[in-house]
Amino acid sequence: METKSLLVEPVQRDNLLERVDFLRLEAHQKLTADRTEKGQFFTPQKIAQFMAHMFAERPSILKILDAGAGIGSLSAALVLEACQWNPKPSAITITAYEIDPTLTEYLHVTLGYCKEVCHQEEIRFEYEVIQDDFIRAAVDVLNGSTLFSLPKSFNAAILNPPYKKINSASITRRLLRKVGVETTNLYSAFLWLTIRLLEPNGELVAITPRSFCNGPYFLPFREVFLRTMSINRIHVFDYRDRAFEDDDVLQENVILHAIKAHQQERVTISSSADPNDPFITVREVEYAQLVYPDDPNVFIHIVPDGLGQRIGQKARSLSTSLDELGITVSTGKVVDFRAADFLKEKPDSETVPLIYPSNFSQGYIAWPNGQNRKPSAIRLAQETTSLLVPSGWYVLVKRFSAKEEKKRVVAAIYDPVRVDAGLIGIENHLNYYHQNGKGLPPLLAKGLAAFLNSTIVDEYFRQFSGHTQVNATDLRNLKYPSLPQLMAIGDKIGDEFPEQDEIDQIILGTLGMDTANTDVKAKKKIDEALDILRALQVPKAQLNQRSALTLLALLDMKPETDWSNASAPLRGITEMMNYFRDHFGISYAPNTRETVRRDTVHQFVQMGLVIANPDDIKRPVNSPKTKYRVDASLLKVIRTYGTIDWDKNLKDYLKNAQKL
């Protein structure tokens, strides 16, 4: 490989990561298609640095395991971090596993760079690149059949494992079972084996999908992980498309820092909009708030701010289970590609309705709706009878939320009066609530659908589910209002489903949660502010909660304020941050004031959305006394948000607005 020639060029501590990132970009171009097939996604430099900085221990001999090392970005970042420790380690060893022969060539170059830097820092350095399947090699080590005379030990592991499902009949699955590992994805298998290979008190830092936090498939992994490791910190990104945006990965990721020891009482949860966002919020929670002691499924609840915590507490105050309600939730039985021979585009006398997610329409099922590109009916035959359910009142929930949907939990009512059929088919992308395979009482169905469509349920669900799938198990794990409460809610739902604000008022009022109304309104107001910023074509870097709160503070918008009453007070950065805390319950550290100014307000000023020092008092831009006010023409437009005039006024404004 031509890049090997770079080994003879001098590498310094200050340019190590830049040199390695060059290798990453080169390898990315060369192997894009192949990597996607294998579930490999290279770690960007910013994330690698962030992860390396999480390590808290300072061993004199640092023994690093990098499983699925790729081109070695994570190892290089940890080496650079260790070179800045005080005291530095006297020695560093790296064992890097990588199965791809092309990547191992780059990996040798990266670790050669690390060796040069360690030599300059007077740190003894050794590395070994093992071109092998990490799972096979780790199983050999754990079974004692390794080629090494003595198994290696590690006090630090840093990894970005591959993300790919494991076929139940695969060689990989059989290998894992040899050492008691039962899991369905490569990333959790890598983590499980890494934990086994770590020394007591060894540290693990890994970036993984968030999907292991809930669901039945990852339960064995969660049980072992939580029993073996002490979670020290979890970092989340607000936007799931930015951590690996070079690869167009739409996946919620978390960065874990855990120690192989007994669990500590408190856990740090931090968050940022994306890897490039310097504005990191940090909060400490009791471990019992992360994993509820009475939860047999040991879901991991990641709540990065106090606003979400309060909403979660309200949702958890409900105590009724589906069993107590006499209700069951199941997944639709019709898998369309398996029943393809029986599906029909248009219904006839030999078919029954087939309900898809695309039949959802304003809280009810519309069939046929004329817009469904899927077959609208399934033929009634001996082979399909077991796939059908009797007509009745059902509550259907989408198993997968589309990109454009703002909500994760989306429910609709199947009203048998609207569809003339004795039997119906429910497609596999839907979950449905029923009583012993039959429909629900009408008021119960309406009340249940309204509850599931409430903001409080959606926000709570996001705290333990980091992916777009809504499993039946997740819905079973929720707590619900009592039967009388659900019936009372259903009594307020008519033939047309209410707007979101009315749904939330009905739910919170019936459940006696009026104090939660402000928190729900606050969350909605933040989302609406983000919607306005998107409409104003604000750059992606400013599309985050911090920017939304800044806009709200500059408009004097409280959770209950209508957009028509927005105003333009004169405020400084500290006043804005106090506003976040006082009216939205979101606190940021005082030392982040400069970040708000530099990474949000500065861009707002450049775009002409905000005017600096409009009172004509000359102050330095970075002065803590600098004041800001929303542009008067923008204020007029924002006051029409949510009305029929918004689109026209926005279009007129954008014609003349400055663009960053």
Image (spheres, rainbow, N blue to C red):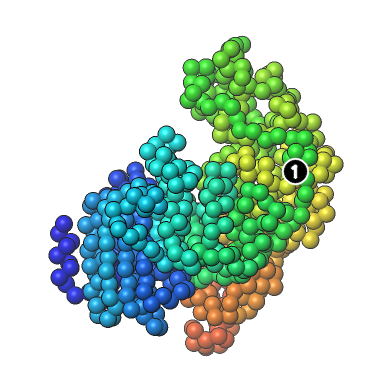
Q: Is residue 43 left or right of residue 598?
A: left
Q: Position of residue 598 (x, y in %)?
A: 48, 76
Q: Residue at x 51, y 46 (%)?
A: 403
Q: Nearer the viewer, residue 601 or 245?
A: 245
Q: How many marks?
A: 1
Rendering quarter of residue 640: bottom right
Q: Is residue 119 left or right of residue 618?
A: left
Relative to 210, residue 112 above or below: below
- Quadrant assignment for the C terminus: bottom left
Question: Where is 332 relative to 205, above or below?
Answer: above
The residue pinned by badge 1 equals: 321
Q: Residue at x 58, y 43 (%)?
A: 216
- Between 568 and 151, the residue placed more toward the observer is 151
Q: Position of residue 593 (x, y in %)?
A: 55, 79
Position in image of residue 88 (x %, y %): 36, 80
Circle 1 packing at 10 Å, graded few (<14), some (14-19), many (20+), is: some
Residue 217, quarter of the rendered image: top right
Q: For residue 370, say whether it is visible.
A: no
Observer able to see residue 302: yes
Residue 199 relative to residue 90: left or right: right
Which of the two residues, 245 or 42, is positioned nearer the viewer here? 42
| x then y, percent, for residue 590 | 58, 80
Question: Residue at the spot x=57%, y=52% of the render?
Answer: 223
- The amino acid beneath tag 1 is Ser
Residue plotted at (30% across, 58% down) = 149
- Looking at the image, is 453 positioned above or below residue 76? above
Which corner quadrant holds the N terminus? Answer: bottom left
Residue toward you, 159 or 37 = 159
Element marked by disc 1: loop
